[in-house]
Image: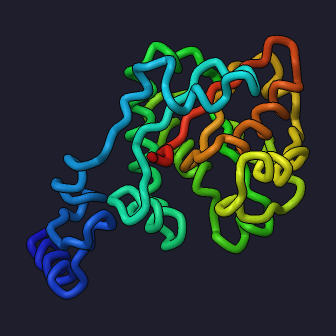
Amino acid sequence: MMALQFFQSLIQLFYPRICPGCGSDAIGKEEFLCLRCLSDLPYTFYNQLADNKVAQMFYGRIKIESAMSLLYFSKHSLVQNIMHEFKYNGGKDLGMFLGNLMGKAINESELFRRCEVLVPLPLHASKEKKRGYNQSEILCRGIQSITGQALSVKNVIRTTPTESQTHKHRTERWDNVEGTFEVSNPDALRGKHVLLVDDVVTTGSTLEACAATILHLGQSTKVSVATLAVASK
């Protein structure tokens, strides 16, 4: 045991773990963020507020039961650093941790307790292969480990690749994603209250298109939305 502890200390000395939020090496072997970044996370508390910014994105567009984002996102911010590590640097363990945070917020909310099935917003197969994983699925698995909700993976699929949404306005974003989703096993979701999960929401166009595909199943199928972050203005 002593030899193992010495070896782990040696590894930490020469290959210290770096906090993805701020770059500090003041982070324990069982932690994913340093204590300072954990305390600085910009929580929205939308899980406790029915009429919030994310829910308002869908007003008059599509019937969403409830919607929330855990954190505020802005450029050159702590949250952007964390999400970049998670999405592009293979930070799946970090993604599980962030999903755990989302799961705790969901458990604390009366708005989301009736959701039955977690569905990750799908990537096109070519994009998922290139990245190695779907970040929304990782978040779902982190949520599930806290809430115990069922998880439906690879059922809702993206049938065609789409262009980046970054520089498109709202109408162009909708045109870019309309008709790009499909449910391969409708019976698994029909009549259920689905919680659709993604990493970040800006205008909500992609989530709207995916939710519309699920709601088209009919027979009292419901959709709520939960994302890790929402773009702040």
Residue shown at 51% from the left, 19% from the top: 51
Please tell me how many numbered marks the rendered image carries: 0
Q: Quadrant of residue 85?
A: bottom left
For the rendered model, the colour scheme is: rainbow
Residue shown at 90% from the left, 45% from the top: 179
Q: Quadrant of residue 55?
A: top right
Looking at the image, residue 34 lies above or below residue 207: below
Looking at the image, residue 144 lies above or below residue 87: above
Q: Position of residue 115 (x, y in %)?
A: 60, 21
Q: Position of residue 31 (x, y in %)?
A: 25, 57
- Front one among 74 and 31: 74
- Front one among 10 and 62: 62
Looking at the image, residue 57 lies above or below residue 138: above
Instruction: Please state, as top left, top right, bottom left or bottom right, where the N terminus lies in the image.
Output: bottom left
Residue shown at 38% from the left, 40% from the top: 101
Looking at the image, residue 108 lies above or below residue 141: above
Query: Is residue 160 shown left or right of residue 106?
Result: right
Q: Position of residue 96 (x, y in %)?
A: 45, 51
Query: Is residue 92 shown left or right of residue 40?
Result: right
Q: Quadrant of residue 4?
A: bottom left
Query: Is residue 27 shown left or right of residue 160?
Result: left
Q: Position of residue 104 (x, y in %)?
A: 38, 31
Residue shown at 43% from the left, 28% from the top: 46
